[in-house]
Amino acid sequence: MSELSNKVVLVTGASSGIGEATVRELASAGARLFIGARRGERLKALAEELGQELGGELGDTIGWAELDVTDADSFEAFAAAAQDRFGRIDVLVNNAGVMPLSPLAALKRDEWKRMIDVNIHGVLNGIAAVLPGFIARKSGHVVNVASVGAHLVLPTAAVYCGTKYAVWAITEGLRQEHDEIRSTIISPGVTATELGDDISDPQVASALKEWRQKSLTPDAIARAIRYALEQPEGVDINEVIVRPTAAN
Ligand code: NDP
């Protein structure tokens, strides 16, 4: 039986890409899932599909709620709904993120703010929503999806990489402060998802298309998340970096 059997896992950004693939992977390992994002219709469709595949009443194994990770109240309500549905929370996967890349000189202040709000405050709001419960129970696992951009900086990605360096530091800080709580950084390389579809600069958008020629599929990242979650209590996978073979 998997270590994940019956564990209650919250996944943010579950409406597409890595989050959706993670939900599918963890459901197949027997986890109970509570999934969030802003596009509720996508979450509903995914929950219905997986609920049917897994058998039983919808709601036994998977629940969903609309979530804006930038809003602390929204995250608190999301965690409370998961707690009501399943009676406990074992794992939070902070996966939601945005990447509207641009050169600094373009001064896209609104996009800088959106990245900081979603990628940093979103992760902190998630930690705040589960940490008191994890401390009280003396167990829990926070998985934060960072990026290879938490280890290197590329032109047009200064702010995005800044947010991912922050995610790396926050996760490491959480690890150092709590012996009984597991914290894992998952750092994907380029992966074929909807990330960056909102890039407004045509040159940067076409450069991203080029990078995507050599990309992973999201299930590769989902398997890394599953690997971290399937370790026995007392084993803490601190970081997994997953790149396509052809990447430098
Ligand atoms: P997608 O764009 O496919 O997924 C991003 C998810 O984040 C969506 O489900 C979106 O849902 C959600 N999201 C965005 N804003 C919010 C918000 N305010 N509140 C709640 N959810 C939000 O991209 P990926 O799957 O690629 O991205 C997942 C993570 O992986 C991100 O943290 C990204 O930075 C990271 N990553 C991705 C890489 C890649 O090459 N794809 C490489 C390295 C890291 P909705 O719009 O419905 O709210």
Image: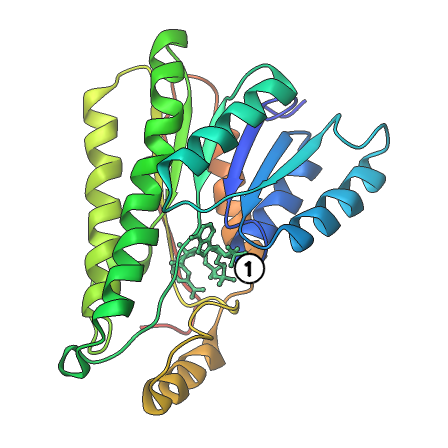
Three-letter code for the amino acid on which mark 1 is drawn? Gly
In this view of the protein, which residue sits in the foreground, 143 or 227?
A: 143
Quadrant of the image for the C terminus? bottom left
Which residue occupies 19% across, 32% down? Answer: 173
Identify the residue position indicated by label 1 in the image: 17
Badge 1: residue crowd in 10 Å (few <14, some 14–19, many ≥20): many
How far across and how far down the image is residue 8, in percent? 58, 25
In the displayed structure, 168 sits above or below 213; it is above
From the viewer's perspective, tell me whether residue 1 is left or right of residue 91: right
In this view of the protein, which residue sits in the foreground, 77 or 7?
A: 77
How far across and how far down the image is residue 198, in percent? 43, 75
In the displayed structure, 34 sits above or below 102; it is above
Which residue occupies 34% across, 22% down? Answer: 131
When asked about the image quadrant of residue 149, the answer is bottom left
Which residue occupies 15% across, 77% down? Answer: 104
User: Of all residues shown, which one is farthest toward the left?
Assistant: 105
In the displayed structure, 72 sits above or below 189; it is above
How far across and how far down the image is residue 30, in percent? 69, 29
User: In the rendered image, is residue 239 in sight?
Assistant: no
Secondary structure beneath label 1: helix
In the displayed structure, 146 sits above or below 209; it is above
When asked about the image quadrant of residue 105, the answer is bottom left
Which residue occupies 51% across, 21% down? Answer: 89
User: In the rendered image, is residue 79 in sight?
Assistant: yes
Beta carbon of the mark 1 residue lies under 8 A of ligand 1: yes
In this view of the protein, which residue sits in the foreground, 224 or 155?
A: 155
